[in-house]
Image (cartoon, rainbow, N blue to C red):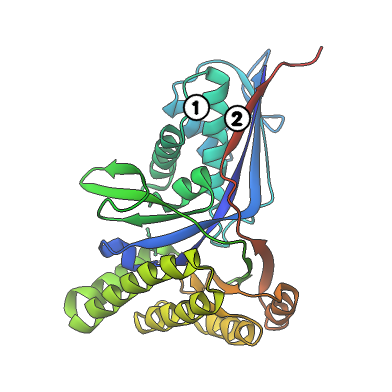
Amino acid sequence: MISKSSAPGKVILFGEHAVVYGEPALAMAVDKRCGCEISVSSSRTTVNGHPIREEYHSYILQCLNILEVDNKLKISTESDIPSGAGMGSSAAVSVATIGALRKFLEKGSTEEMIAKDAFNVEFEVQGNASPIDTSTSTHGNAIMVSEKKEKDFLWEIKKDEKSWNIHHRDIPDMDFVIGDTGVHSSTGPLVEKVKKFYRKSNFAREIIQEIGEIVRDGCVLLEEEDLEGVGRLMNKNHRLLSILGVSHPSLEKLIKGARRHSYGAKLTGAGGGGSMIALTDEPNKVAEVIEKKGGTPYVLKSTKKGLTSTNTEEKE
Ligand code: MEV
């Protein structure tokens, strides 16, 4: 038997950083995917033809651990999600691998089971993780994560003292361009920087709340397919993130350039470098500007398609 799966990457549209303080965040699935194929191996477990090794295959190894797999497997993965560009490439690998493994082992494969396993995989490998990436990659379309259970609740993810409620949100077909600044940024120190500001300043706490309101308004405008409104909120969300101190000159340069041909543009993810996202009807023009300004553009569409997985009989 061969089990095959495919899981999308994601981008955060609204709410990064504020989500750390219990405000909601919205992420959507994009049309770049990671595929995984699993069959029985006659000798040892391999990944893309090589023996599985912790230093190269930490996420896949953790998927095998979590599902307590001791069979020898032939695992192949293929991804067109760029890594380190804020598109959830490691989450998609984890979701696709868990999805294929659960099919292969006939262990039950509801979205909730897969999203929870994949979150645990990311948590084990990274030492810290938010469930936004893995839940979006599993469910597709868009997810809103918040402290409370709200309309279209899907599942709750718990870790230690923390808990996140995951909700379905519907989004229209949209064109986006991601611009990778090429400036390396680490999420941990940026979260710490905002935390310091948050602890000592009322102003910072008000900004965080205002970002929460943007997320809620954004969900309504997306449902109404009001792209101009969504773009305006993206610009506003970016302004607030800049005040929190997580923008970067390289992001400002790409965002300013992209806005000439976009409904709106903002940083996506932790900031401090990393990537920006623009909502546009002219993706090629935006991609051209991003390239001219020294960034690497990725033209994307939103997608409703989350994880897919199938079992097929192996041919002789
Ligand atoms: C990073 O992709 C998003 C942050 O909000 C951190 C997190 O939610 O874990 C900055």
Tell me if mark 2 has few (under 14), some (14-19) or many (20+) residues whose alpha carbon lies within 10 angstroms of its own.
some
Which one is earlier in the sequence, the residue at label 1 or at label 2? 2
| Front tag of 1 and 2 | 1
- Point 48% across, 28% down: residue: 109
Residue at image location 41% in from the left, 76% down from the top: 246
Q: Quadrant of ligand 1?
A: bottom left
The residue labelled by disc 1 is 64
What residue is shown at x 49% (from left), y 32% (from top)?
Answer: 63
Find the residue positioned furthest to the right: 316
Q: Indicate the secondary structure of the residue bearing disc 1.
A: helix
Say which quarter of the image contains residue 251.
bottom right
Q: Secondary structure at mark 2?
A: loop
Q: Nearer the viewer, residue 311 or 51?
A: 311
Residue 70 location (% of width, % of height): 50, 16
Question: Looking at this rendering, what residue extends furthest in the front direction?
Answer: 224
Residue type at the position of mark 2: Ile
Residue 66 picture location, percent across and down:
42, 28
- Cα separation between marks 1 and 2: 11 Å
Q: Position of residue 8 (x, y in %)?
A: 59, 48
**Circle 1/circle 2 CB separation < 8 Å:** yes
Where's the C terminus, which quadrant?
A: top right
In the rendered view, tell whether residue 243 sits above or below residue 105. Answer: below
Read off the residue under disc 2: 52
Q: Is residue 147 left or right of residue 143?
A: left
Residue 193 in view (yes/no): no
Mark 1 crowdedness (10 Å alpha carbons): few <14, some 14-19, many ≥20: some
The amino acid beneath tag 1 is: Leu
Instruction: Judge whether residue 236 can be spotted in this image.
Output: yes
Q: Is residue 77 above or below residue 209?
A: above
Residue 130 position within the rendered picture, expressed as x and y whole percent measured from the top left: 38, 52
Q: Can you say which quadrant of the picture contains the N terminus?
A: top right
